Image (cartoon, helix red, strand yellow):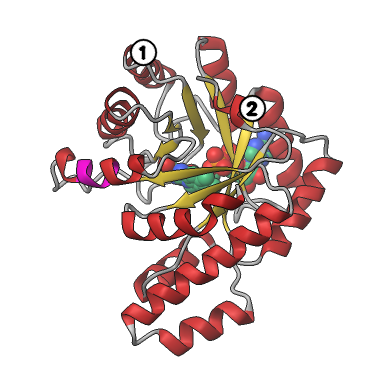
Amino acid sequence: MNISDLYKKDKTILSFEVFPPKKTSPIESVYGVLEELCALGPAYISVTYGAGGTAADNTLAIASKIKNDYGIETTAHLTCVNSDKEQVTEVLKKLRENNIDNILALRGDRVPDVEPKTDFRYASELTAFIKQFGGFHVAGACYPETHPEAEDDISDIINLKKKVDAGAEFLISQLFFDNNLFYDFRKRCLLAGIDVPIEAGIMPVVNKNQIQRMVSLCGASLPAKFSKIMNRYEDNPEALRDAGIAYAVDQCVDLISSGVSGIHLYTMNNPYVARKITEAIGKLL
Ligand code: FAD
């Protein structure tokens, strides 16, 4: 299935992201989570990929399980910073053999002390390569608050346009906590001629470690309303969880009523949180 066929005018889709278990845990440890998430009926579930390429087989196994055993559409993430064309070709062949049609093509973050490979410098080059290989629909990542390595917001949008021109049929955004930043970004995209569907990445923050980690990794800015909630409930895990879910639901309601193409929920492999949010917004989609 081509995921970009799911985006319809006046309708918002809900999709999930999951990640493979750590190398020390067996792949089966995530199957219970997948079963619960699939039962919620998302439009599709995307599966992250280790930039080192070490967990490639796990991404494939999980995406295959979601699609072929649970009957939910999937997008396999694929990074290229540490891969050459031969390695990417091998992954594409395996994805094909496993009936996977959709790929989120990413550059990936550089791994400290690992010299990046040079076949693909940017996600747009990987996108073009996958399109040339044939048989896949390709999505790309985008950054409402600008990618941290970009010179400025304008050059980042110009680069994003190159990714769309190379074949990205829809985009999934980095997480953000201030919807206005996403709306401004959508306008910049339109001005640059980027008119593919853009899904809004929403991360329900349900524990203290998560917020510190996420913000240091992706640099999302924190609105005063969000920080107030985090500060007030940081030492009360259940209240923080409920407040984090409520904040994400509030963001989703505003995004849906503003006509966003899709909401991509970073589930953090937490079915409880995904269920609460799905129940709260299910009828609004
Ligand atoms: P690019 O689109 O290549 O952009 C990277 C930088 O290069 C940007 O600053 C851009 O402006 C610049 N650039 C792009 N093209 C050009 C050009 N032609 N000339 C000059 N500059 C250019 N990481 C993982 O390791 N695994 C995952 O599974 C994963 N999933 C993700 C899912 C989503 C939805 C998002 C938003 C991010 C994800 N990431 C993942 C993180 C991602 O790999 C990093 O943010 C990485 O630093 C950039 O990847 P990209 O594909 O956006 O890169």
Percent x, y of residue 248: 53, 64
The kind of secondary structure element at disc 2 is strand
85 relative to 181 in the view: left or right: left
In the displayed structure, 238 sits above or below 184; it is below
Residue highlighted by disc 2: 169
In the displayed structure, 239 sits above or below 280; it is below
Residue furthest to the right: 191
Depth check, front residue: 109 or 72 = 72
Whether residue 242 can be seen here: yes
Percent x, y of residue 79: 44, 34
Amino acid at the residue labelled 1: Lys
Residue at (59, 67) in percent of width and height: 250
Percent x, y of residue 174: 56, 52
**What range of the chain is rendered magenta?**
30-34
Q: Which mark is residue 47?
A: none
Depth check, front residue: 197 or 153 = 197
Amino acid at the residue labelled 2: Glu
Residue highlighted by disc 1: 93
Q: Quadrant of ligand 1?
A: top right
Whether residue 122 can be seen here: no
